Image (cartoon, rainbow, N blue to C red):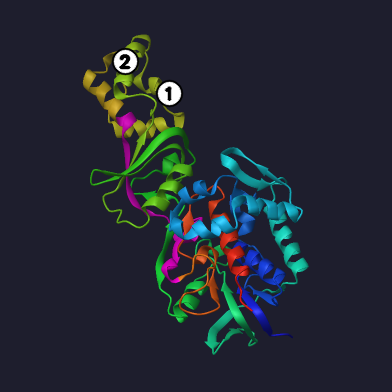
Amino acid sequence: MKTKYDVIVIGGGASGMMASIFSARNGHDTLVLDHNEKLGKKLYITGKGKCNITNNSSIENHLSNIITNSKFMYSALNTFSPQDTMQFFEDNGLSLRTERGNRVFPTSDKSSDVIKTLEKAMQRSGVIVSLNNEIERVDKRGDVFYILCTNKIEYTCSSLIVATGGVSYSGTGASSLGYEIARKFSHNVIEPKSALCPIVVKEDVSELNGLALRNVNMKIEKDGKVLTNEQGELLFTYTSLTGPLPLTASSRINKIDLSGAKIIIDFKPALTEQKLEEKFIREFKDYAKKDFKNYLHTLLPESMIDYFMKKLNIKNKKVADLTKQERNKLISTLKRFDFSIESLDNINISIVTSGGVDIKEINNKTCESKLVDNLYFVGEVLDVDALTGGFNLQIAWSTGYVAGNSIKG
């Protein structure tokens, strides 16, 4: 069995596959090592199994959606843009379509088709793949990297690309291997944190499990300061808030102390308190003989009403019997319904990892280490993360491309 290669890529995910293709296309004898039983295991579940490949928008828009270290990605995105990504997949036989929010998916809606496209491109380029191969040790002696696997086979190469991903979604084989390799070569690793994950709250929200709220405003406040403020959709689980608003917020707040932080929901963001007051004065006449709880059906989803009533702490009565003070309390509760934050959810279920190899020690044009010649870090193993919408995968494609095209010799 051959063990000597020009380039070895550790990790067969999005960035690793892309890096291997362009390394091999440039004439380098390239091997991909992965401990999983198949390539692109995390890709299978991205975009709810449809694989949101990229976002068909400007580089500026991509940069604005990168939460951590967006400036680092400027060169890579300009070298291999979202449109270059789309062209690459289409040139390799994958039909694409663009959905709401400029999200790009395979026409088939099958992430497996994205992986098959990459695998075929790898085969045509001459990439060698070795699966079920656990890495035991990585060393460099002189100009040669030595990669010892648990099967006691030692591979060597002159250039090494680390594409091991982050530590989120451990079920897909995610591990800390990339960080261990980085530290082995004296790189600083920024502490990994959950990103794009549910937010666990202190209150018991189990009775709201499965409830979706649409067109609401969600703020996160701490010590009187607004940390995030966006409008959209959220979903309750047994212990947390998830969905677009909480997921986005989690990436914005994962580096701060959340003790004392609160989630504030505005159920009626289109109406000011004054407009709500006018609305209630007008409608209370029509609903005067109705139970107050029944009136709440005009304002809230049915499965929210009992929970809302407990928070409001107003006994059910006829609408006509509500006092002005109680009406004001209803307005303030609709506009500022709060939950206390316990924590961000476990990193194992976060969509991406925030943190990783410190980009200050990485060349942003090539993704080569500034500390060790011919050592490259690409994709989620880097301390770069973005919001949902195809932006994280574009980071993988762009960094993989520039590394694969930057191999010397």
Report the residue marked by disc 2. 278
* Depicted 198 relative to depicted 165: above or below: above
Please state which amino acid type lies under the numbered disc 2.
Glu
Placement of the N terminus among the 4 image quadrants = bottom right
Estimate how packed mark 1 is, as few (under 14), some (14 to 19) or many (20 or more) residues with alpha carbons within 10 Å: few
Q: List x then y, in percent, for residue 61.
A: 50, 46
Say which residue appears at 49% left-offset and 74% top-offset. Answer: 369
Question: In this picture, which residue range is highlighted in magenta?
Answer: 333-361
Residue 338 visible in the shown view: yes
Say which residue appears at 73% left-offset and 51% top-offset. Answer: 90
Find out whether residue 207 is within the magenta segment: no
* Depicted 187 relative to depicted 287: above or below: below
Say which residue appears at 53% left-offset and 86% top-offset. Answer: 140
Return the mark for residue 83.
none
Residue farthest toward the bottom in the current orientation of the protein: 142
In this view, the residue in front, 343 or 72, is 72
Q: How many marks?
A: 2
Q: Secondary structure at mark 1?
A: helix
Say which residue appears at 40% left-offset and 67% top-offset. Answer: 190
Q: List x then y, in percent, for residue 88.
A: 69, 55
Q: List x then y, in percent, for residue 231.
A: 42, 36
Placement of the C terminus among the 4 image quadrants = bottom right
Return the mark for residue 297.
1
Q: Secondary structure at mark 2?
A: helix
Please state which amino acid type lies under the numbered disc 1.
His
Find out whether residue 341 is within the magenta segment: yes
Residue farthest toward the top in the current orientation of the protein: 285
